[in-house]
Amino acid sequence: MSPQLLALAILLILLPQASALAQENHFAGQRAMNPGLDLNPDVDTEHENEIMAALQLAAEFETDQDHDSALDEYLSLVQVVAQAEGEYSDQLLEPLAGLSRTYIALDYVEEAESSIRRAQHIAHRNDGVYSPRQIEFIEMMVDLALKTGAPLQADKQQHFLFFIGTRRFAGLEGTHAYIKLANWYTATGQYREARKILEEAITLIQTSAGEYDLRLLEPLRLISQSRRLQGGCCIEKGLERAIEILDQHVDAPADVIADIYSELGDANIIYNKPDIAAEQYAASYIAMEAAGNQVPRLISMSKRIGKTSHHQKKMFRLEQNSFGGYNRMRRMSLDEQLEAQYQPPQFYIVPLSGNSYGLKIKDTLTMGMTSDDEVKTERMIGSPFQFISHQLQNILPIALRDESKLASIFIDLKFTVDETGKVENVEFTNSNAPVKLNRLMKEVMRKVKFRPGLVEGRPVITHNVTLSQSFGPH
């Protein structure tokens, strides 16, 4: 063997040994700086198991609402993972999510925001701006904004979620982003904005999948809901279109068919067409097959209180310019008149089930130009009937305008719901409310609509229905 070949052979034998020695020296140095860590690659699995066990323990503390213990576990876990895997490791995302939730639960606002921002930065760094892994953290920012009384910041984060969803997922895969934003708009009283985004979703689905695709049902139902909650017209149109689509699908889910017919029945109850409503409730019952009897149920909607004389009123407001000054008077729209803070309650809302925001963001499509954030939002108060907080304050004695005292007020009612959904024979069974508040509830009960009690799908009169109205903030 030539001297050159011999030297090469010796080198090939020694290189693996030298590499192993260098690697061991590196890990020894790391252990010297971080005695609590074991970075031997032979125990990677054991290290991962320890992380998973710590995550599970922290999650158990969180579930049990032992937030102090959860905080200690998540903080320790974030530190250990960062030291072992690096400051920008993907493995930090789950511990940071738990840490952020715990900070929010403990009302540590600044710490929660810092933790969420850190997680977002890691997701952006590793996956780009459109990373779907940041969605959980953006949703936490929404919760944090609502918790701290910053609804417009929550609205901004919802738009960012839509931005991610429509750019990360093309075509029909992005439809869920439209539905999510529409639900937010509807829950926060931005009804026209909701319908605008839902029409875009409908166009997207029809273009990609045809005019009778079942994915059209949800946006059509949501359009109907937004009209009902706004107290507007044409509630039935989207639902009737949904029925046309269902007629093309013999295998459509029974519960979807039943819900759409029930909502169409509710629309006709609102329109004072009980005979047509009865037919639709019967169709809902047939679709579900032995669905059982149902007690009367409040229909989610809004309704004006008292006389509808607003069309004759001329109300004006000072228009704010971009420099913060006021330069002209502008006649208020009907919506603005109904929501004006200095009036007594002008309407009530029965929100959709599960909507606990207690918030109304005014539609940009109906507002004039203004930079005053307070003008753009309203707090809603009360359950099951919600009123604009400022308007409710206008009919309360000064002693009850404090939120804690207002929260202690209740009005218990007993009444009859006839087969047309109308309320009769209203009695106050118990109340500690002032006279003006009791009078307000009488006005509301004259306007309210129920889905009537149903026996085998047939509307019936129901006596001794009870309802308790409270006025605590959400």
Image (cartoon, helix red, strand yellow):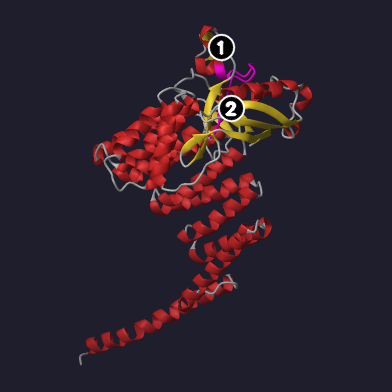
- Please, which residue is most extreme toward the left here? 2
Near-viewer residue (303 or 363): 303
- Residue 358: image location, x then y, percent: 59, 34
Q: Name the quadrant containing residue 163.
A: top left
Mark carried by residue 328: none
Q: Secondary structure at mark 2?
A: strand
Per the rendered image, the range of residues in magenta is 338-351
Query: Where's the N terminus, which quadrant?
Result: bottom left
- Residue nearest the viewer, comparing 53 with 410: 410
Q: Earlier in the sequence, mark 1 or mark 2?
A: 1
- Label 1, secondary structure: give it: strand
User: Quick check: is 172 in the magenta stretch?
Assistant: no
Q: Amino acid at mark 2?
A: Val
Image position of 159 (left or right of 378): left
In the image, is residue 83 above or below residue 446? below
Residue at which label 1 appears: 318
Quadrant of the rendered image containing residue 344: top right
Quadrant location, the C terminus:
top right
**Residue indicated by mark 2:** 423
168 in relation to 331, above or below: below
Tell me if residue 300 can be seen.
yes
Q: Residue furthest bottom?
A: 1
Q: Amino acid at mark 1?
A: Leu
Q: Is residue 349 magenta?
A: yes
Query: How far across and how far down the image is residue 364, in percent?
Result: 46, 24
> Dot 1 surroundings within 10 Å: few (below 14), some, or many (20 or more)?
some
Name the residue at 20% across, 90% down. Answer: 2
Badge 2 density bin: few <14, some 14–19, many ≥20, Cα 10 Å: many
Given this view, does label 1 or label 2 mark the residue nearer the observer?
2
